[in-house]
Amino acid sequence: MDTGTKHDRIRILFVDDEENVLKALQRVFIDEDYEILTAQSGEEGLEILKTKEIAVIVSDQRMPGMSGAEFLEQAGSLSPDSARLILTGHADMNTAIDAINKGGAQRYITKPWKNDDLISTLHRASERYRLIKENRYLTELTNRQNEELKKWSAELEMYVQEQTVELTYKTKELADMNATLERNFRNFVITISNLIELRDNNIANHSNNVAIISEKIAEKIGLNKEEIQNIKIAAQLHDIGKIGIPDAILLKDIDALAPFEELEYKKHSVRGQVAVDSNDAFREAGVLIRHHHESYDGKGFPDGLSGDKIPLGSRIIAIADRFDRLLLTRVTENALNEIKLLSGRLFDPHLFHLLAETAGDREKSFSFAGKTVETELHPDELLPTMVLSRDIRSGTGLLLISKGVILNPKKIDSIKRYYNFDPPNTGVFVWRE
């Protein structure tokens, strides 16, 4: 079947035995960004469906030979994701209902139609189809990462399955579908960032930390929701290009790399952009990933950008990235002092005070009044409102829940489940009064 590329126009198939009706429908959509296909019988329409990927199918009910309901029923077997609509006259409501019940049509359109209403209806139907394809694309991308990294375990597959929600498009409103897709999207990003960090235990939870710090700085600047979301995604995946770097290089300090190794290492930001660019939802984040190693003085990589020519999101991720790495060996105050010395050379100096405020907020969030005693508990001893004092990781190293999270019944059930099939070597550490 000709599925075309990701950027092909959406295809709509009109089926009607009257050529003048088909021409009228084509005229309605002449200024719309769709590829219009037509067929003058159900049989001809089925042949098209065997060779073309169709987003929306609109069929007349009354046709010689195969009726619209019969055609849509067979079309559903050939192209189950396609939106199916029936064209019918006011006198044919019973046959329209038959097309919905038997042919799986989502709705009917009466003749004569109103052009604006018809365009709006097909816009919504094509958007529904696009969301289905986008969700399937994300699932397939996750599976490809599974093959490439060879790090997926049976436990992680169980986790992905638990997070996958079966969408019932015939009974849910578009708003419900969007909410489910957004939730799956967030979980997908977190899953990929966790897989990246499985290669280096020394940076445990680094991507999540950088994402949190970057998000808070972006919020303090006053960026809009979409900009903050792109920065958060880019921060979560900023090291995805390191997947292609050999372990012999990745495990060395940057200062210890040989020239040819340093050259290979510096490719990872570009590789990161390439890795996510095929997905429209990641395209803007990919630009931020590419430039997160640029220096404010123009001596960074890969493009030697300087000052405000570096995307703001990349400048935010750069300072958050270095700060979190410094915290591995330094207390917060010393880490901030080092960042301050590097501001104006490596980092945007205007971001330092925002980083300092964010660091202060994070310090306060971990200073739980009245909860100064850290206690190790068995999962069965956990209670709602307890606060995690340390990250929880599975026995195979997957980050499950970050420190600072307030437990609720759902999170406690998840912890118990993971301790059953992938138990860590310790209990759960919490703050208690």
Image (spheres, rainbow, N blue to C red):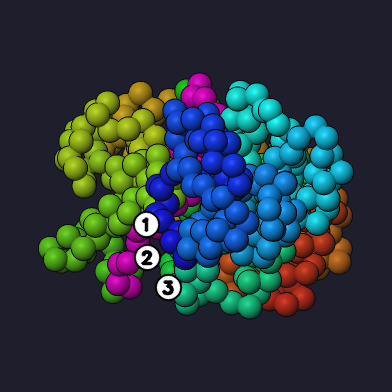
Q: Is residue 140 visible?
A: no
Assign a secondary structure to mark 3: helix
Horizontal side of 273 relative to 134 (left or right) equals: left
Residue positioned 87% across, 43% down in the render: 94
Confirm or deny contact between disc 3 and disc 1 (CB under 8 A).
no
Mark 2 — residue? 243
Confirm or deny contact between disc 2 and disc 3 (CB under 8 A).
yes
Residue positioned 21% across, 46% down in the render: 301
Query: Does the magenta run of residues contain 92?
Result: no
Mark identifier at residue 275:
1
Q: Please name the predominant secondary structure of the magenta segment in the image.
A: helix
Q: Earlier in the sequence, mark 2 or mark 1?
A: 2
Assign a secondary structure to mark 2: helix
Residues in magenta, as a range: 222-247
Whole-percent x and y of residue 421? 73, 77
Q: Amino acid at mark 2?
A: Ile
Whole-percent x and y of residue 178? 66, 42
Q: Is residue 307 visible?
A: yes
Foreground: 190 or 142?
142
Residue positioned 12% across, 63% down in the render: 259
Whole-percent x and y of residue 81? 63, 56
Q: Earlier in the sequence, mark 2 or mark 3?
A: 3
Q: Amino acid at mark 1?
A: Ala
Q: Amino acid at mark 3?
A: Glu
Assign a secondary structure to mark 1: helix
Q: Earlier in the sequence, mark 3 or mark 1?
A: 3
The number of discs equals: 3
Mark 3 — residue? 148
